[in-house]
Image (spheres, rainbow, N blue to C red):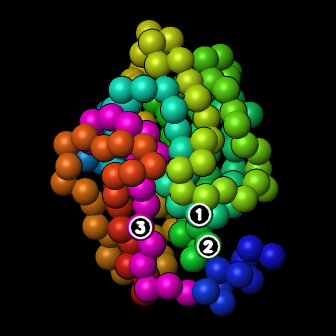
Amino acid sequence: MLKKFFREKKESEETLVAPITGNTVAIEGIPDEMFSQKMLGDGMAIEPTEGVVVSPLDGEVIQFFPTKHAVGIRGINGLEVLIHIGLETVALNGEGFEGHVQQGDQVKAGDKLVTFDLEFIKEKADSIISPVVITNLDIVDTLTKTSDPTVHRGESVLLTAKFK
């Protein structure tokens, strides 16, 4: 149903609000080659200053990892976004994370997706830096990234994708 809806809607661009409050990090500065080399897509990262993740756009949760460390959302215009909380956090097996959505849920920009224990993740994970990447760049013509050094969840614009 959502697929049909976003194909009919077809806006010229999609704006993503910051899903996490914190300090921005260029994707090339992420200490993980899967992200810094853009193997999963392009975007930015945020070094969180609090443990709350919200949806960056209106859409559907298309992937919610059982370990609660990552969420995939497809926007109503077809844009697919992956939010990955910290690096190598899959090894925590969900410890320190609490999910507030499940796969198939419809979400609006600003809806709470995950909460996490920031201090626990800082202590146990390789890094707290949290990538936010667009995984289906084939539909994107240009991607504009914020130049702001800090962003606030649900309020600050993080990325703007113009469609082909």
- The answer to whether residue 26 is left or right of residue 90 is left
* Measured Cα–Cα span from mark 2 to mark 3: 12 Å
* Measured Cα–Cα span from mark 3 to mark 1: 10 Å
* Residue that mark 2 sits on: 76
Asked whether disc 2 touches disc 1, contact meaning CB atoms under 8 Å apart, the reply is yes
The C terminus lies in which quarter of the figure? Answer: bottom left
Asked whether the viewer can see residue 114, the reply is: yes
**Rendered residue at 56%/87% (across/down):** 10
Look at the numbered disc 3 and give the secondary structure of its residue. Answer: strand
The quarter of the displayed image where residue 109 is located: bottom right
Q: Which residues are magenta?
A: 10-25
Q: Which mark is residue 58?
A: 1
Asked whether the viewer can see residue 88, the reply is: no
Placement of 47 over or under 145, stated as above or below: above
**Rendered residue at 48%/76% (across/down):** 138
122 or 56, which is in the foreground? 56
The N terminus lies in which quarter of the figure? Answer: bottom right
**Rendered residue at 39%/72% (across/down):** 161
Task: Give the mark nearest the N terminus, 2 or 1.
Answer: 1
* Residue that mark 3 sits on: 15
